[in-house]
Amino acid sequence: MQSVSRLSINQYTVRNWTIPQLLEGCAAAQIPFVSLWRDKIAEAGLDETLKLLGDTGIKVSSVCRGGFFPAATLDQQSRNLEENCRAIDEAAAVGAEVLVLVCGGILNHDLDRTRDMVAEGIASLVPYAEQAGVKLGIEPLHPMFAADRSVIVSLSQANAIAQLVGSANLGIVIDVYHVWWDPAVYSEIARAAGRIFGFHVNDWIVPLPDILNGRGMMGDGVIEIPRLRNAVTAAGYLGPIEVEIFNDELWRLPGRELLRLVKDRFLTYV
């Protein structure tokens, strides 16, 4: 069972809330961390976001998201790099240690080349992240997202890129929804020791109501969350644990009710 001292609320878990509502709600619930999304920062404005963070004392565990590296042209590749640099600037501004990278889907029916482009894009971004003091966390997604969101679909692939680039500012973000099924998950978590920059919890409901927006509340599905948490802890990760749940049904709940449910389930199942 976890203490609330490590709990972080991902912005999209309470998707209908603005940043002011999120920060005020978490402050009232004594939740110490949030993970902010760039579209919500843009909506609130960076200056207002910084003011609210200062007023509430809440820390930002990560910013979502950078990535989407594959590009059909050199011009698009350059624009992708510029956008990722802006994402790093925003992460640095709000005091987030980590920018989460969702690497991008397949391009031109060429899976191998697309994966090479991801590794090349990350390598080109790392020097800027090092200068800004922001860590980049490669988040492998479940294989069902390879077509449109990420061709990096396993911890093995993410670890390989991190080892190849070899920067202290590049590591792994582990989301249980995406990795629980992998027969190599525990050996790959151990392999990632010292490079784990984030740990996200939720659950896998059976049957899955929706691929993207059907993640479950902790305790409602089949994932061995405590076992995965223990493995991540043994690999040296002691930072915030983010609850990241995309779920259409849960988004219909009033925000404060949903936040109470998240906190209760976190304390019980994580």
Image (cartoon, grey):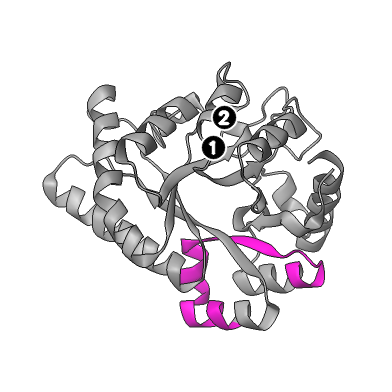
Q: Position of residue 97 (x, y in %)?
A: 50, 60
Q: Quadrant of the N terminus?
A: top right
Q: Which residue is mark 2?
A: 190
Q: Position of residue 202 (x, y in %)?
A: 69, 39
Question: Mark 2 touching mark 1, by CB under 8 A?
Answer: yes
> On the picture, is 237 further left or further right than 151?
right
Query: Are there few (<14), some (14-19), or many (20+) residues within 10 Å of tag 1?
Result: some
Q: Which residue is mark 1?
A: 193
Inspect the image, locate mark 1, and give the three-letter code of the amino acid beneath it: Ala
Which residue is farthest top? 183
Let me know if residue 50 is in the magenta part: yes
On the image, which quarter does residue 105 sit in? top left
Q: Residue at x 32, y 65 (%)?
A: 131
- What element does badge 1 sit on? loop
Q: For mark 2, does the 10 Å Cα neighbourhood hold few (<14), some (14 to 19), or many (20 or more) residues?
A: some
Q: Secondary structure at mark 2?
A: helix
Looking at the picture, how far across and down is residue 56, in whole percent? 69, 78
Characterize the magenta stretch by its predominant secondary structure. helix
Q: Can residue 141 be seen at all in this image of the molecule?
A: yes
Whether the magenta-drawn stretch holds residue 31 is answered as yes
Residue closest to the eye, 24 or 270: 270
Image quarter of the C terminus: top right
Cα distance in 3D space between marks 2 and 1 = 5 Å
**Given the image, on which type of amino acid does mark 2 rest?**
Ala
Magenta stretch: give its range: 26-51
- Residue at 49 percent across and 33 percent down: it is 141
